[in-house]
Image (cartoon, rainbow, N blue to C red):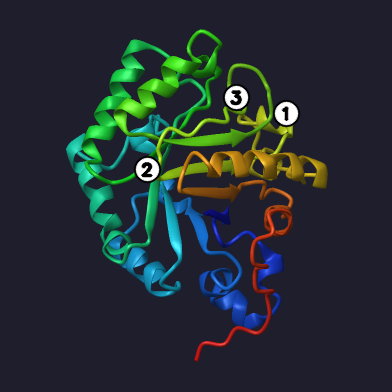
Amino acid sequence: MILIGLTGWGDHPTLYPDKESARHKLAAYSRVFRTVEVDSSFYAVQPVRNMEKWTAETPPDFRFVVKAYQGMTGHARGGVPFEGDDAMYGAFLESLAPMREAGKLLAVLFQYPPWFDCTREHVGLLRAAKARMGNVPCALEFRHQSWFAPQMRERTLAFMREEGWIHSVCDEPQAGEGSVPIVEEATDPALTIVRFHGRNAAGWRSGGRPDWREVRYLYRYRTEELAEWAERLRRLERQSQQVCVLFNNNSGGDAADNAREMSRLLGLEPPEPPGQLSLF
């Protein structure tokens, strides 16, 4: 089974053509797609009330991928508002409770930064993070190519399988050591995640610029690129029961159109077109 969705539900104006749908974006989004990545959880551990609200606003078969808080992945260089790791992970796990209880949590995504390279110390941090998450399904995404260097590729994949990490396969610019190649391998028989970041190499290196959000994911996939990926997704589907595909090329508003086109290429049931939102 292949699920297709987007990262976040707020940055896709073509999904909200009228005032009512713009006021109730998640409800409108869930008429078109059946999965979404929650990115706000990266910037702050979300209050339980937010997670309850989002859970209630979506259909029973809707699924969330929740991004791990930045303090859990080493992004938060300026410190975190928690006394220690126990408090931080405890708060994050508590926030997941509404989605878990409703059966709507697909996985938590641990995306590590470009400076998180393949070292013994970092392998230890991965083991510790996975242990703290208990039985919550966790996906792992790297941003440093050393994990998939020729001499490390199979060892990294074997480690992920042994530790129970779901592989987050990436399509992203090949822009030096701060990016990873496409690694078409599942590490979990139940789920594989695929994230499309675009192929804008210049934008990928824009981290120090004030407009980095506007340029990093500025890319529109061509039909032939999506068609090539459709074949990959079918192969990954033979390795995992579910493949969750998330389009993150949001900088230019291309993600929703690319996701719809991928649905058509895969012969999936066409998403419901946006229109007047009925709340009753």
Q: CA distance from mark 3 to mark 1?
A: 10 Å
Residue pictured at 71% horizontal, 33% vertical: 203
Label 3 sits on residue? 179
Label 1 sits on residue? 201
Give the amino acid type for the residue marked by disc 2 in the picture.
Tyr
Give the amino acid type for the residue marked by disc 1 in the picture.
Ala
**Disc 1, SS:** helix
Q: Is residue 211 visible?
A: no
Give the amino acid type for the residue marked by disc 3 in the picture.
Ser
Q: Residues within 10 Å of mark 2 (few under 14, many from 20)?
A: many
Q: Residues within 10 Å of mark 3 (few under 14, many from 20)?
A: many
The outermost residue toward the bottom is 280
Q: Where is residue 70 drawn, in percent x and y? A: 40, 38
Q: Earlier in the sequence, mark 3 or mark 1?
A: 3
Q: Is residue 173 visible?
A: yes
* 29 sits left or right of 95 in the view: right
Mark identifier at residue 251: none
Q: Is residue 105 above or below residue 153?
A: below
Label 2 sits on residue? 69
Q: Where is residue 260 drawn, in percent x and y? A: 70, 60
Residue pictured at 39% horizontal, 48% vertical: 107
Residue pictured at 65% horizontal, 74% vertical: 272
Which sits in the foreground, 17 or 257? 257
Q: Is residue 17 above or below residue 153?
A: below
